[in-house]
Image (cartoon, rainbow, N blue to C red):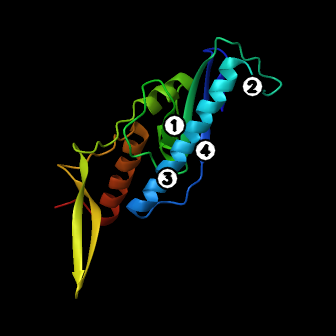
Amino acid sequence: MAWDPNQRLMIIIETKWPVDAATLAESFKVAALFDKGVDQFRRLRSVLDEGSAIASWPSMWQVPPDTTWSWWVGSAQQLDSREPRQPHDIGTTSLRLVEHLLPARDLLDLMTRMAAVSLPKRGLDWDLEPRAVSAGHLTLHYDALALLGAPQAPAIRASDSQRLDVIVSLATTIIGPAS
């Protein structure tokens, strides 16, 4: 949870710690954890909105009622691969992604970056293709991820670009210029 009293913004991230998914079936379990977190937040918001519960903030926080709240469910490393829920609802993210969005100028900048992340879309960037592998008289059927078109490359931050320039410069000094 983070609060910016000057902008009257608060972000609350419910963190889930699933085992990293190595198979498609395991990724569905991660999706179920995102759903669980979203359901928990919906119940929490419901009791807060109806007044049957009151938020207990740290003693030095004086959170005014007109504070804008942003609700997110995050896992340690994996993103929710499904289509986003309703706009301005409860978002999903990974803490690893949030880490790469930092540093941010302020909480609004971070929240804007989190909401604007462009993820690959099924049917446009990727899809599932049925596959089969035969071994003797047995055949294993499974779905495989297939990339459609050229893969997306993440945007490089200025700090990453500067580090890359240093690495290239060091490599040129050690190995010599590319021929």
Q: Which residue is mark 1?
A: 102
Distance (Cα) linking label 4 and label 1 = 18 Å
Pointer 1 local density, CA inside 10 Å: few below 14, some 14–19, many at least 20: few
Element under label 3? helix
Q: Residue at x 44, y 45 (%)?
A: 80
Circle nearer the N terminus (4, 1): 4
The quadrant in which residue 55 appears is top right
Element under label 2? loop
Q: Give the residue type at disc 1.
A: Leu
Q: Which residue is mark 2?
A: 55
Distance (Cα) linking label 3 and label 1 = 24 Å
Circle nearer the N terminus (2, 3): 3
Element under label 4? strand
Q: Which residue is mark 4?
A: 15
Q: Is residue 146 left or right of residue 157?
A: left
Distance (Cα) linking label 4 and label 2 = 18 Å
Q: Give the residue type at disc 3.
A: Val
Pointer 3 local density, CA inside 10 Å: few below 14, some 14–19, many at least 20: many
Q: Is residue 82 left or right of residue 125?
A: right
